[in-house]
Image (cartoon, rainbow, N blue to C red):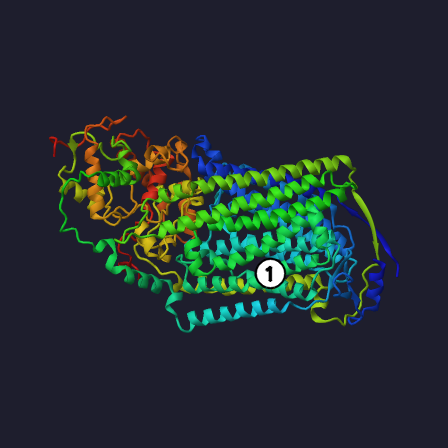
Amino acid sequence: MSTADEKINRGQEQDYEIDTLTNDRLISDHEYDGIRELDNDLPPWWTWLFVITIVFAIVYLIRLFVFSSDDLIQQSEYNKEMAQAASMLPSQIQTSAIEFKVLTDQTSLTNGKTIFDKICSVCHLMDGGGLVGPNMTDDHWIHGNTMEEMFNIVTNGVLDKGMISYKDQYSPQQRLEVLSYILTLHGSKPANPKAPQGDLKEWPY
Amino acid sequence: MAVEKFTYDNRIAKYFAVATVLWGVVGLLVGLIIAIELVFPWLNLNLEFITFGRLRPLHTNAVIFAFVGNGIFTAVYYSVPRLLKTPMFSELLSKIHFWGWQFIIVCAAITLPLGLTTGKEYAELEFPIDILITLIWVVFGWNLFGTLIKRRTRHIYVAIWFYIAALVTVAVLHITNSLELPVKFFKSYPIYAGVQDAFVQWWYGHNAVAFFLTAAYLGLMYYFVPKAANRPIYSYKLSIIHFWALIFLYIWAGPHHLLYSSTPDWVQALGVVFSVVLIAPSWGGMINGLLTLRGAWDKVREDPVLKMFVVGVTAYGMATLEGPLLSLKSVNAISHFTDWTIAHVHIGALGWNGMMTFGMLYWLFPRFFKVKLYSKAMANTHFWLATLGMLFFAIPLYFAGFTQALMWKEFTVEGYLKYPNFLETYLQIRPMHLLRVVGGILYLTGGILMVINLIKTAKSGKFARFEEDQAPPLEKKASTEKFHRRIEGKPITFAILALVAVLIGTIIEFVPLFVIKSNIKTIASVKPYTPLELQGRDIYLKEGCYNCHSQMIRPFRSEVERYGEYSKSGESVYDHPFQWGSRRTGPDLAREGVKSGKIYKPDSWHYEHLVNPQKTNIQSIMPAYPWLAKKDIDIASTPSKIKAMRSLGVPYPAGFESSSVDDLNKQAGAIASGLRNAGIQVEDQKQIIALIAYLQRLGTDVGANPEMVIK
């Protein structure tokens, strides 16, 4: 670009060329491997965007460092969320009034199966034959087989053996549903049944 | 004035361009493989080397450092000599740079599948490769500054400002984040732990995006967009303002990756505000790129190169608006740990880096070979495949991210989690992961079309290695220019100022976090890992478990209900490196070992599950790790690992290393005999025993009652 070279020699900032396609001013001595630069100002909306975000940042930091606003301190946020939820936390639910009876209606058993397949099967297998946890289909029970005994197991777990408590994950009704479903597996023939564990109990319970 | 004649050597630029294409295809292919593995876990074929946890780092490293890295060097080695009117400083340095970088990539491609990893995302390469990277980076810097010193133009163009900022900052990032203590060949521990390691890692990770993937590519944009469009840059003033604002502000924003984690509130707040303030400087780059095309929009309709640049720059604008939005805590509470983040980074990688690279290659090859592009139609098809591929990739993942986050957070009216089973929340988004695979196939197909097109172009022409040019020599003269114009004539000063700009934020964030004790609250009950757990932890790192499992329970009711007490800063003080993770493809493991907790499983379950996850749940998408039950723990390394940890500040008693093997054997024996009692045939010294020991330790130091033990 020989014309550009001449411009460099002139070196005067106010000595502008005009870009014919946009009518914007080219900066005279700015030419790099044929690339020129225009003398356009910052777009005002861009400048305002920048200013607004800076104001946001300053306000945000003042709220944290000067006023210690609750919504910027995560411990306070958490305490607030838990306080709001306090009345309905699972741990608050009373289980004393529960009637320990086997549910036989189809809806309950379907709900129970859904939970069993998602949660219990991970240790007791889908068909209840047992893997890490005991076989659910035979006549042997380690921790008892009354509805109340089984309910206590699901509610409090058998921590030493790896059975966790499900009281925070499923409601008492859901626990009854899944237990009722488990009883329907009795006498079924799982593919690889785990050897019997615990005491022999007589069916029906 | 006498005019000097000189010659540009296109050979190294061509080498880098070819490497870009090659590694681009490799990076995309590995990405596609892991995307499919995520949906069909059996595709690891029970082989450790191709399991998701080992291939995902290979994918990210290949795309970032091999594909984009070579793209940067192509742009630099082609544009810098022309912008400075001089050949590159040294052909030897150029060659060392090229072959050294490819050697690093090959080392990465070998070591990552072997499981030789530091366990820090995007910085997985072990210390010998880290050292090599440092050396090659020095060679690159030497070559670049040598060229700058020999230049015949007084001022350096904005593209080179960005190259300089990238060069300087990446050096600072890489060295600081890679400070690690070698234990043996290809095994080291980072000197940082827990909160501090997380902070350093994301300061690095975020700014690898900022300077490697962004600043260097803005340099590429500033050269190739005006060249391809034959139009002047929209605004020089905007270049100045957005350049300095960008590099000064970007370095602060790393903690936005750690929102609601156990990092202090003030660190998180800085991450939030500096991300928001970044919108305008980022958009300055987009505006300057897009508005440079004013007067050339008719060409954009015709020219595949310009089309790709337009989509690339637009994707940059979208990603840099989305980034700040994701940095708002209320948005991050939803997006973090989900596919939303994955979608976001792929708008950047596929849109910005991919499209800019493709445009550059389509522009360069005809010039290298002095011939027209073999097929414009193929390039146009590539453009559409890439654009659609990106959308098919990103849109399902946005949907997936949002869906899964809402499922994680939903409670029933009775106050129970609606979806207490984690897997259920994954199965819901599985179709989206299949659609993402479709997007990946489209994008890769476009890439293969490009390979064919470029090969055909090369074959139809003859490589023009040398190009003649001429310019008057640079004269020394007293400068009367304005401040910025003056430093554009002083590259060393410019580099120092850029370094200062990035060090300000770095120092202001680093110093308090490392000096003020109250930032990380001591918990008396947190103890170092036992030797067996430490070995298990190294297996956890080696298998890349952190690629799918987080260890960071955020202080939300939904997470505390699902996983247990939220994570405390004092809990990870002995974690060299931290393992908080960034995506929960599987559940969080921070409280895995708490017996009275929400997700505890007995040892025998872990054994069965690791060997064959589908045995415990047919729908599980975890790959099987049968080799863990066959391979032995590297017991001999135990004493040196204990010693290394002690010198990093982990309080193992003096002389403990000499009894560490006995300690390990004793604990392993207890676990293994427990498993044997449960009917599982396993020997004491197998890797799976160590991994189980580690998993059962997780979260137990604090347990159920954390308030009792915080000093």
Horizontal arrangement in the rendering, residue B189 relative to residue B696 (left or right):
right
Q: Quadrant of residue B637?
A: top left
Is there any visible trace of residue B72 in the rendered image?
Answer: no
Number of numbered discs on residues: 1
Q: Which residue is mark 1?
A: B283
Question: Residue B606, position in %: x, y?
Answer: 32, 38
Identified at 43% across, 31% down, the residue is B46
B511 to B216, vertically: above or below: below
User: To which chain does the residue with label 1 belong?
Assistant: B
For the residue labelled by badge 1, is the local secondary structure a helix, a strand or a loop?
Answer: helix
Q: Depth check: A199 or B653 in front?
A: A199
Q: Quadrant of residue A152?
A: top left
Question: Residue B297, position in %: x, y?
Answer: 70, 54
Q: Quadrant of residue B587?
A: top left
Horizontal arrangement in the rendering, residue B214 relative to residue B339 (left or right):
right
Q: Residue furthest front?
A: A106
Callout 1 amino acid: Trp
Q: Residue furthest bottom?
A: A66
B356 to B325, vertically: above or below: above
Tell me the quarter of the image containing the C terminus of chain A: top left
Question: Residue B608, position in %: x, y?
Answer: 33, 34
Q: Depth check: B117 or A133 in front?
A: A133
Identified at 44% across, 57% down, the residue is B332
A139 to B547, vertically: above or below: above
Horizontal arrangement in the rendering, residue A19 relative to residue A123 (left or right):
right
Tell me the quarter of the image containing the N terminus of chain A: bottom right
Is there any visible trace of residue A149 in the rendered image?
Answer: yes
Question: Residue A138, position in %: x, y?
Answer: 18, 29
